[in-house]
Image (tube, grey):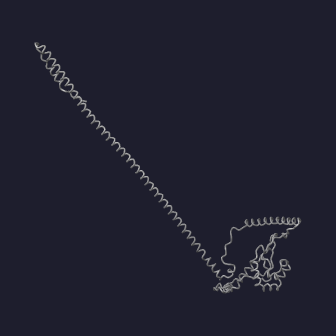
Amino acid sequence: MRGESVRKNNFIKYYSYARAKALTAETIKAAFRKTGIHPLDPNAIPDWVYEAALNTTTQPSQPIRTALPDLLEISVPQSPFSQLAPSTNQADSPSAKSSVSDSPSNASSFHSLDITLDETTDEYFSRMTAKDMFRFSGLSENISADATLEDLHVQNIQLWDLLEKACHQMQHDFALKLQEQLFRKQKKPPKRFAAATASRHMTSEEALEALAYEEWKPKWIEVNKSFKERLRTIAKDKKADEEKQRQANKEERKRQKEIRDKQKELEQQEKEQRKVEKEIEKARKEAEKEATRLEKAAQKAERDRIATEKKAAIEEKKRVAAAEKERREKEKQKKGTGKKNEGWPQKDKPLEEQSDSKKTLTPRRILV
């Protein structure tokens, strides 16, 4: 197989052969022992292996260099290491790239000044702001107070050009923003719980914590699931209890309403009964009053009858007395005429006339 080039048509064959030769049980166990996975040895790999790499390159990290807008220019002030770092124009040129990347003296100088660069750049540029690092391009210098009309006209033209560039840049930024909103991934990839440095060391504390978390997570999901079911059951029972309480309250209100209605009905009946009793009492009093009035009227009639009888008796006595007086007068007259006619015998009255005279003498009782 030596001397043959690996191509697309024979990659799988060579890969399977190499994999069978490389990934054996002995190599895997040796790798586990070397990295401290089995037997477990967290200190198998020293800590300095996981230290961050020093940024000593002058090349951009991205495949395509980041392009700044035409309106901005980088304004880097003089720093303590400005004499050591190459300029921007020199770094961009092909000769500078080859010299920086290939020259061992440059590499050794950067390696020797790693600590100095880290200390100076981090401390110096951390205090810088966007206003210090960038400035607008195309702006003229501030004109003096005694500027001519031509200077003002030139500055006005520059400002108009800058305004057009700013409008174009705003439209470009807005288009990029819309593009980002349109093509944004809705489903984000799952989060990694272990850090990038810990993923290299499977026996580190972060990796062990991540493994424990991955083992604990499904159990916690089950606990949450059962807890949610319990919460749903509790909520359902609570809702049922509330419904029962609501029905009980409704029945209680209905019963109270029936009691109030019955009380009102009883009060109405008592009121009507009192009204009937009052009417009966009133009728009784009126009957008693009428009976008293009738009794008084009867007594008055009796008194009037007695008075009438007395009056009739008095009148009868008066009439009898008058009749007696008249009779006596007649007798006197008869006696007087008898003396004149003594020689003539008088005939006796018949019995009927005597009885009539007796009847006239007896008083009559007048009934009213």
Q: Is residue 285 above or below residue 16?
A: above
- Among the 4 quarters of the image, the one containing residue 170: bottom right
Q: State whether residue 80 is above or below residue 336.
A: below
Above-or-below relation of 344 to 277: above
Q: Nearer the viewer, residue 222 or 325?
A: 325
The answer to which image quadrant residue 172 occupies is: bottom right
291 in relation to 316, above or below: below
Q: For this rendering, which residue is in front, 207 or 304?
A: 304
Residue furthest top in the image = 343
Looking at the image, which residue is at 38% across and 46% down? 275
Residue 340, percent from left and from top: 13, 14
Q: Image check: 187 left or right of 154? A: left
Q: Quadrant of the N terminus?
A: bottom right
Which residue is depicted at the point 64% across and 82% down?
A: 205
- Residue 228 placement, left or right of 82: left
Q: How many marks?
A: 0
Q: Position of residue 254 (x, y in %)?
A: 46, 55
- Which residue shows up at 28% across the image and 35% down it? 300
Picture coordinates of residue 93, whole percent (x, y): 85, 77
Q: Foreground residue, 100 or 313?
A: 313
Observer-nearest of 121 and 329: 329
Question: Looking at the figure, which quarter contains the C terminus?
Answer: top left
Q: In which image quadrant can residue 215 be found?
A: bottom right
Residue 4 appears at what percent x and percent y? Answer: 80, 81
